[in-house]
Image (spheres, rainbow, N blue to C red):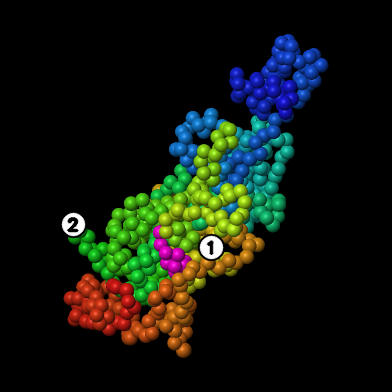
């Protein structure tokens, strides 16, 4: 009874040929068919002549869907939701089941995430990809606007627009912008023009077979009349536009609530229309050093403390069945001797991580990696401790969420709830129970509490210690750019061999964000293109927008921790006159050592050994000596005073 006669008639007309009577593409045909149905209603006695005339004269008012996945740049998100629902109920249920699906998407965060990732990809492409020429060229006529509408372009890369060069000289190019086209395929009569000044093309060095050409000295060196290009309006002058091109590099990004696993934003690449492959949830890439925090978390679970020392010195391992010898190196190509766990994370020391993984056992690391949600089945090889195993951005963010939420296992989700056509809830992600929530009245009982059955992967105290280490990565380590956020934040960079993959996964107390950049066909992105250089700025750009206007919230400290002032370099209790003092969290029953004998001498000795060490034979835990066997050096004992649990 809420529909008019005209509306009812139009709905009745649709089933025969919905496309033929599309309200926007075939408006006149739709009205004719609707009016035919109204006429039959009159002939069959359902309405009188007056109502027939009134209904047939009513315009066909159809409100278009106000929102679509592309509005929020959320096609990748929407497709993953579709796959999940199909997995649960089948494709037929999606199309005909009348399901109502409530997702976890936050439109604001989704738009901001895509904006930040695109900014990072475009920035790299402009600097290292060079100018690869226009999208196409057209013969310039008075119908240039109509010609532009015939050129296929993705509709999910706003605010970019297609434009054609109308005039060009050394200082500026005049462009004509693609007009809008409505749902009935009617081209707007409005003709917009703009300018591309030299300042917006000077980045466009020509892409050569080897490297890039020289910086252009004029606009006419870059653009010609008839060139069809992508442009974006500048913020400083609405008449001016920036020259754009679709980047070759790609990437993925995930934003998650660490306490619930709800995914607020997911970006799977530059454009879903250009490539449906999802780099956030499908692409398996090596995370590199971004995996190290999980190794250190396992070590802390196994009895290590933040002051425990691990040897940073040359390491060799024979590969079974091969003549090859594996020699992991630090990024700096140097070694720093016995170092604390914190330094190992903050400075991303590879050799320390390998020794740590060898001591606690890669089988144990693999088990924890599965519980963290990072890997389903990680091969127990030492190289895997350095992030050599392939995983996804989604899985890495899932693992870091465990660190952020106090050690609880989570299951990531894009769906909160699904209801059938009758409004009945048939799926709910949150499985927590509240057995006392339905009491009719209060009778002095305790207030209702949700029962959480999730597994405790690591102790809350361990999770905080790792979080503190990762705060140090931002303050003193490999991600200094993130300090500009000005709020408590933890995170870790990741870079793979030959600079093929760049990662940064970081978090605040209530938001975890993972960023990955790389080519779909892995290749070297250039020397120094590390996670700290490429991915961390994307994280920073997003977090500035996501946390704008929100208070700085410190990480929550669980019970069972005590804080001590220690020497950040040696790990021993701070003494008067120490310069490298930090506050470190120790679990109940543990504390920093009071002194460390000959620590400085030991560092100097190990640094000078360089690659001369052949094998580390054994560690005598009784007197704190390390015995090194080498054919170039006499057997020697380096006297070290070590924290309990520090095994090399």
Query: Which residue occupies the foreground of this view, 450 or 361?
Result: 450
Residue 376, percent from left and from top: 36, 51
Magenta segment's dominant SS is helix
For the residue labelled by badge 1, is the local secondary structure a helix, a strand or a loop?
Answer: loop
Q: Is residue 206 located in the magenta-colored stretch of the structure?
A: no
Residue 88, percent from left and from top: 46, 38
Image quarter of the N terminus: top right
Query: Which residue occupies the foreground of this view, 564 or 145?
Result: 564
Compared to 134, does 55 lie above or below? Answer: above
Q: Nearer the viewer, mark 2 or mark 1?
A: 1
Residue 412 seen in the current view: yes
Query: Which residue occupies the foreground of this view, 598 or 595?
Result: 595
For residue 321, the mark is 2
- The range drawn in magenta is 457-469
Residue 132 seen in the current view: no
* Residue plotted at (44% across, 68% down): 461
Image quarter of the C terminus: bottom left
* Residue plotted at (80% across, 14% down): 49
Furthest toward the right, the residue is 50
* Residue plotted at (56% across, 44% down): 103
CA gap between label 2 and label 1 equals 47 Å
Do residues under tags 2 and 1 come within 8 Å of each other at their CB atoms? Answer: no
* Residue plotted at (57% across, 57% down): 445
For the residue labelled by badge 2, is the local secondary structure a helix, a strand or a loop?
Answer: loop
For residue 509, the mark is 1
């Amino acid at each position: 009874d809420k529909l008019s006669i005209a509306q009812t008639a139009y709905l009745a007309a649709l089933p025969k040929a919905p496309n033929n009577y599309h309200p926007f593409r075939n408006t006149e045909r739709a009205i004719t068919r609707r009016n035919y149905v109204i006429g039959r209603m009159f002939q069959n006695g359902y309405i009188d002549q007056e109502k027939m005339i009134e209904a047939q004269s009513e315009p066909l008012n159809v409100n278009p869907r106000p929102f679509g996945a592309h509005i929020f740049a959320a096609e990748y998100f929407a497709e993953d939701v579709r796959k999940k629902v199909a997995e649960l109920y089948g494709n037929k249920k999606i199309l005909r089941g009348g399901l109502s699906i409530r997702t976890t998407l936050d439109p604001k965060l989704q738009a901001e995430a895509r904006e930040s990732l695109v900014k990072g990809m475009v920035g790299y492409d402009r600097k290292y990809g060079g100018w690869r020429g226009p999208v196409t060229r057209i013969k310039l006529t008075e119908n240039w606007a109509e010609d532009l509408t015939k050129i296929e372009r993705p509709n999910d890369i706003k605010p970019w627009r297609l434009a054609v060069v109308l005039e060009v000289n050394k200082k500026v190019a005049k462009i004509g912008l693609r007009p809008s086209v409505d749902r009935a395929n009617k081209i707007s009569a409005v003709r917009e023009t703009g300018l591309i000044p030299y300042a917006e093309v000077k980045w466009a060095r020509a892409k050569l077979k080897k490297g890039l050409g020289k910086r252009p000295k004029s606009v006419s060196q870059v653009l010609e009349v008839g060139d069809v290009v992508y442009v974006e309006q500048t913020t400083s002058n609405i008449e001016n536009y920036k020259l754009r091109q679709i980047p070759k590099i790609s990437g993925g990004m995930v934003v998650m609530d660490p306490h619930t696993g709800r995914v607020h934003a997911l970006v799977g690449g530059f454009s879903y229309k250009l490539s449906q492959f999802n780099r956030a949830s499908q692409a398996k890439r090596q995370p590199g050093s971004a995996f190290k925090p999980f190794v250190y978390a396992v070590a802390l679970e196994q009895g290590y403390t933040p002051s425990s020392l691990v040897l940073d010195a040359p390491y060799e391992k024979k590969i079974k069945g091969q003549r090859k010898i594996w020699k992991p190196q630090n990024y700096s190509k140097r070694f720093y001797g016995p170092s604390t766990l914190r330094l190992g994370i903050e400075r991303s020391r590879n050799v320390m991580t390998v020794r740590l993984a060898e001591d606690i056992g890669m089988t144990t690391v693999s088990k924890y990696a599965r519980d963290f949600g990072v890997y389903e089945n990680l091969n127990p090889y030492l190289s895997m401790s350095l992030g050599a195993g392939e995983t996804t951005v989604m899985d890495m963010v899932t693992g870091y969420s465990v660190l952020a939420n106090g050690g609880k296992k989570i299951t990531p989700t894009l769906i909160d709830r699904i209801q059938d056509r009758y409004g009945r809830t048939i799926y709910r992600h949150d499985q927590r129970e509240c057995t006392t929530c339905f009491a009719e009245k209060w009778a002095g009982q305790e207030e209702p509490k949700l029962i959480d059955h999730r597994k405790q992967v690591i102790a809350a105290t361990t999770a905080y210690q790792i979080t503190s280490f990762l705060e140090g990565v931002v303050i003193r380590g490999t991600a200094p750019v993130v300090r500009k956020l000005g709020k408590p934040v933890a995170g870790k960079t990741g870079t793979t061999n030959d600079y093929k993959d760049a990662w940064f996964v970081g978090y605040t107390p209530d938001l975890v964000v993972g960023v990955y950049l790389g080519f779909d066909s892995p290749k070297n992105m250039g020397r120094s293109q590390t996670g700290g250089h490429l991915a961390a700025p994307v994280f920073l750009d997003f977090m500035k927008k996501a946390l704008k206007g929100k208070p700085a919230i410190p990480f929550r400290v669980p019970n069972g921790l005590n804080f001590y002032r220690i020497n950040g370099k040696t790990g021993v209790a701070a003494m008067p006159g120490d310069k490298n003092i930090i506050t470190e969290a120790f679990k109940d029953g543990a504390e920093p050592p009071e002194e460390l004998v000959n620590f400085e001498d030991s560092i100097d000795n190990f640094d000078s050994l360089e690659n001369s060490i052949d094998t580390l034979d054994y560690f005598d835990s009784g007197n704190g000596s390390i015995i090194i066997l080498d054919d170039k050096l006499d057997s020697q004992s380096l006297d070290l005073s070590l924290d309990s649990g520090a095994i090399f």
